[in-house]
Image (cartoon, rainbow, N blue to C red):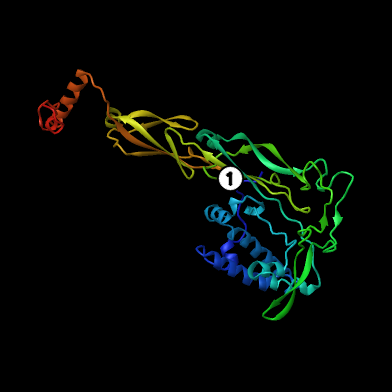
Amino acid sequence: MVIILADNKRDYYEVLGISKGASDDDIKKAYRNMAKKYHPDANPDNAEAEAKFKEASEAYEVLSDSAKKAQYDQFGHSAFGGPGGGGYTYSGQGFDMGDIFESFFGDGFSDIFGGGRGGARRRGPARGADVHANISITFEESFFGTNREVTVPVNEECDTCHGSGAKPGTSAETCKNCSGSGQERYQQQSIFGIVTSVRTCQVCRGEGKIIKTPCQKCAGRGKVRRQKTFEIPIPKGIDHGQSIRRSGKGEPGERGGEPGDLLVTVSVSPHAHFKRRDLNIHLNLPISFAKLALGAEIEIPTMNGVEKHTIKPGTQSGTIITLKGKGFPHVRNARVFGDLHATLSVQIPTKLSEGQKEHLRAFAADSGEVVDEPKKGGLFSKLKGEK
């Protein structure tokens, strides 16, 4: 499990040379320029160019996806929890400059780079899709940590055909249309004349093989849908809306690619008295007038029990008492804690005995105030419609 690791990658916006408020078109244009400049086909045996191309491709993978971009804008690389802080790793497999031009201009330009090397190429390994789930925990569980089980539907390798998609005893045949390459050449008219281009084979859909007798259990898919249950450790200090990543627990990859990840988003239910702000806990603590006026030893509830604190005579309502280190632990560093801020508020009794009332009247009189109970028939009563 990887959770919001330290960030040691360059900012994705910086990588593409754009501002955080860049539009989708700006992101696309910036990536296109980077891809043209640093693609390995245009820079053979240039390790620095290849590294920059992979870095730009990783940035575009996130910023071109609205959901991933929103997560990145809020949490940075930690939103994806992968090694070094980023959850996406560009492999460079199954990708060439022809792919870039196809995505921006269409198939007519695909052979400018890819076809120029003489060769249609079967689609390479593809990473499996991530699986998403949501769980709810209590305020206390977010503080102390806990474990939760989550059940999600995932595709798994068919145990009958072992992922081949072919009925046991048979095997997939090489596609005759593309000779197993997964791609086919075709010609079309363009502004430059007749252009020979490369595209995904229309017969085998890029697989390079054709299954004539499919497995009955998986209908030739090579995968079956199952419910899987995972135990998810919830770390201390996790906040509402943060996600936990379980690497390799998502959908299986295609053509030997790596599996995706399981992403579990945590919802934290509110507490009756405590409120969280970053790592700090805030509490409204009612105190009697007498204790505020005379001073007293009071008890302040915390997540770890009660803390005693002495307030001075004449303490005002609204005074904030800070207990250092009594807040939430940092999710990435359990030795770092926030604080607890208790705001004192005067507690007014709703029912008083006659003796208590007399004492208050005497106190008011001694302070130069005249306090009388409202009488029926007075202005206030008239405003209420009393007679």
Q: Quadrant of residue 313?
A: top left
Q: Quadrant of residue 316?
A: top left
Identify the residue shown where x is 76% and y is 71%: 186
Q: Position of residue 382 (x, y in %)?
A: 11, 31
Asked whether, in this view, residue 258 is left or right of residue 295, the answer is: right
Above-or-below relation of 94 to 310: below
Q: Position of residue 26 (x, y in %)?
A: 55, 68
- For disc 1, the neighbor class at 10 Å (few under 14, some 14 to 19, many from 20) is many
Q: Amino acid at mark 1?
A: Ser
- On the rendered image, what quadrant is the N terminus found in? top right
Q: Which residue is mark 1?
A: 243
Q: Give 124 or 314, whichever is nearer the viewer.
A: 124
- On the rendered image, what quadrant is the C terminus found in? top left
Q: Position of residue 271 (x, y in %)?
A: 45, 34
Q: Give 271 or 370, whichever is nearer the viewer.
A: 271
Asked whether, in this view, residue 183 is left or right of residue 297, the answer is: right
